[in-house]
């Protein structure tokens, strides 16, 4: 499989990095995410850690975007606290992002090797929830 890369949205990385530096304090919030909507707006969020599990920053961002009336995202990135840089989405987030936004671009990679790929490239041969729903009669 050949993965095509897309331009890297440096402004989006900086928005997530700024949020990670300024709002991720302590063990409850260690990751920040930023996404660009199709109309160009930037939405941000942080994770909500809890010992019972908790939503990753990407999942919180989906809810925050919906609360702002944004239902279509173009690109997303997650950045770790303590200057950890870009962090790829976990498996659960990859599946959720694919189901919500099948054309989404995701920024991944480290340092000078960051790149933008399609969510489908991060979850090849994937189960697509919408493909397995019964049509309403």
Image: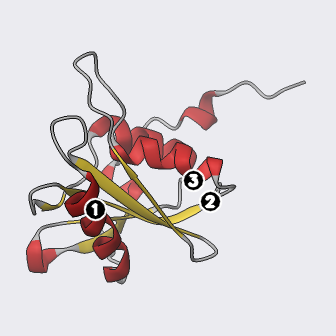
How many C-alpha atoms fall within 10 Å of the one at disc 2: few (<14), some, or many (≥20)?
A: some
The answer to whether 4 appears left or right of 41 in the picture is left
Write down the residue under mark 1. Answer: 1
> What residue is pinned by disc 2?
72
Color encoding of the figure: secondary structure
* Residue at horizontal 62 percent and vertical 59 percent from the top: 72
48 or 136: nearer the viewer = 48
Q: Secondary structure at mark 3?
A: helix
- Residue tagged by mark 3? 65
For the residues marked 3 and 2, what is the alpha-carbon distance in whole angstroms?
Answer: 9 Å
Q: Is residue 57 visible?
A: yes
**Quadrant of residue 12 within the rendered picture:** bottom left
User: Alpha-carbon distance for marks 1 and 3?
Assistant: 32 Å
Residue pictured at 19% horizontal, 47% vertical:
25
Kindly identify the residue that appears in the image at 64 percent across and 75 percent down. Answer: 39
**Side (left or right) of 85 relative to 129:** left
Choose between 82 and 39: the one closer to the eye. Answer: 82
Question: Residue 9 location in percent, x, y?
Answer: 36, 80
Q: Which mark is residue 90?
A: none
């Amino acid at each position: 499989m050949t993965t095509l890369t897309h331009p890297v949205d440096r402004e989006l990385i900086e928005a997530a990095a700024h949020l990670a530096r300024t709002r991720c304090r302590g063990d409850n919030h260690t990751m920040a995410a930023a996404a660009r909507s199709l109309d160009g707006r930037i939405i941000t969020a942080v994770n909500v850690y809890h010992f019972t599990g908790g939503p990753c920053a990407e999942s919180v961002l989906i809810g925050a975007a919906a609360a702002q009336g944004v239902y279509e995202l173009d690109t997303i990135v997650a950045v770790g606290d303590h200057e950890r840089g870009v962090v790829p989405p976990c498996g659960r987030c990859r599946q959720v992002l694919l189901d919500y936004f099948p054309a989404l671009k995701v920024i991944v990679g480290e340092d000078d090797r960051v790149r933008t790929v399609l969510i489908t490239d991060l979850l090849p041969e994937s189960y697509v929830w919408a493909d397995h729903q019964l049509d309403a009669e």
